[in-house]
Image (cartoon, rainbow, N blue to C red):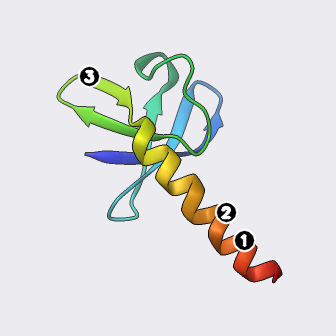
Amino acid sequence: MKVIIDRFEGKYAVCEREDLEIINIERDKIPQEAKEGDVLIIQADKITIYRDGTEQKRRRIEKLMDELWD
């Protein structure tokens, strides 16, 4: 399952699943270097940062912002 970190609240990372459902994941269960906007892959009990997915999402957002300001 893929999720995107929306924000951090206390000891939780508030994440959005692909089906747009919001879930909370304890911060100590995700990689320490994870930050808002990162895409995470959850497989069984292992959570990793999907760096390619995060970069693709950032490029898509930048393109949309550029088009908005043009």
- Disc 2: which residue: 62
The x, y position of residue 8, in whole percent, is: 63, 36
Q: CA distance from mark 3 to mark 2?
A: 30 Å
Res 58 visible: yes
Please state, as top left, top right, bottom left or bottom right, where the N terminus lies in the image: top left
**What kind of element bears circle 3?**
strand
Residue 34 shown left or right of residue 16 in the figure: right
In this rendering, which labeled residue sits more in front, label 3 or label 1? 1
The x, y position of residue 33, in whole percent, is: 57, 20
Amino acid on which disc 1 is placed: Met
Q: Are marks 2 and 1 in contact (CB under 8 Å)?
A: yes
The x, y position of residue 23, in whole percent, is: 42, 46
- Disc 1: which residue: 65
- Disc 3: which residue: 46
Res 4 visible: no
Amino acid on which disc 2 is placed: Glu
| Label 3: few (<14), some (14–19) or many (≥20) C-alpha neighbours in 10 Å | few
Residue 41, picture quadrant: top left
Question: What residue is shown at x 51% (from left), y 46% (from top)?
Answer: 55
